Amino acid sequence: MNYAGWLVWGFAGTIVLTILMSFSQAFHMTRMNIPYILGMIVTPDRDRARLAGIFMHMANGWILSLLYIAAFHQWDGPAWWKGAVIGFTHASFLLVTMPIFPSLHPRMADETYGPTVVRQLEPPGFLALNYGIQTPVSIILSHIVFGIILGTFYKMP
C-alpha cells in the first residue's frame, strides 16, 4: 500500500467532499451539515460541536479512504470510474442507513417521538429527505467526486 498516497489523497478527497457539501448548504440544496452532526455526538455546545465535527469528519474521510484503496487493490488497481462506483455505493449505503442515526446519536430527535430538551437535532428520515429534497443528490455527487479523486490520483506501489 502507498501510505503517502493514501494520506495525501484521502485528505484531499475529504476536503473536496466537505467543500462540496458546504456549497450544497450555501446554495440551499440541503440543510445537512455532517461535521455539525458528528460534533454534536461529543458535545452539546454548538460552537465546539462544529470544531469537533470537522476533526471527526476528516478522520472519517481518512479511514473510509482506506476502504476505497483496499477495494482498488482487490480490483486490479485504481481508476477514476472505479472510484466513482465505490463513491456511489458508499453514498447509497449512507443514505439507506441514515434513518437509524437517531437511535445512535445522543442529541438527535426521533421521528416517532420528536424533539426533547436533549434531542434537538432533526432526524434525517428516509434517504435524508428531512434535510431537503436535493440532499440525496448532494450526498451522492460529493461521494462520487471523493471516489474519483482517490481513483485518479492514488498510485499503487
Image: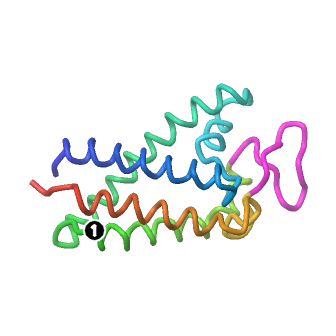
Asked if residue 151 is positioned above or below residue 56 in the image, the reply reads below
Q: Nearer the viewer, residue 51 or 26?
A: 26
Q: Is residue 1 left or right of residue 67?
A: left
Residue 15 placement (x, y as % from top left) = 42, 44
Residue at 65% of width from left, 64% of height from top?
Answer: 135
Residue numbers of the magenta segment: 105-123
Q: Nearer the viewer, residue 105 or 22?
A: 22
Describe the element under mark 1 as helix, strand or loop: helix
Q: Of residues 146 and 28, which is closer to you in this image?
A: 28
- Whether 131 is among the magenta residues is no
Quarter containing the C terminus: bottom left
Q: Which residue is mark 1?
A: 80
Residue type at tag 1: Trp
From the top left corner, tell me how far across and down residue 63 is, in percent.
38, 47
Residue 132: x, y in percent? 73, 63
Q: Residue furthest front?
A: 27
Instruction: Give yes or no for residue 114 being in the magenta stretch.
Output: yes
Chief secondary structure of the magenta portion: loop
Is 108 displayed left or right of 38 in the figure? right
**Residue at 32% over, 67% down:** 83
Crowd around label 1: few <14 · some 14–19 · many ≥20 (10 Å): some
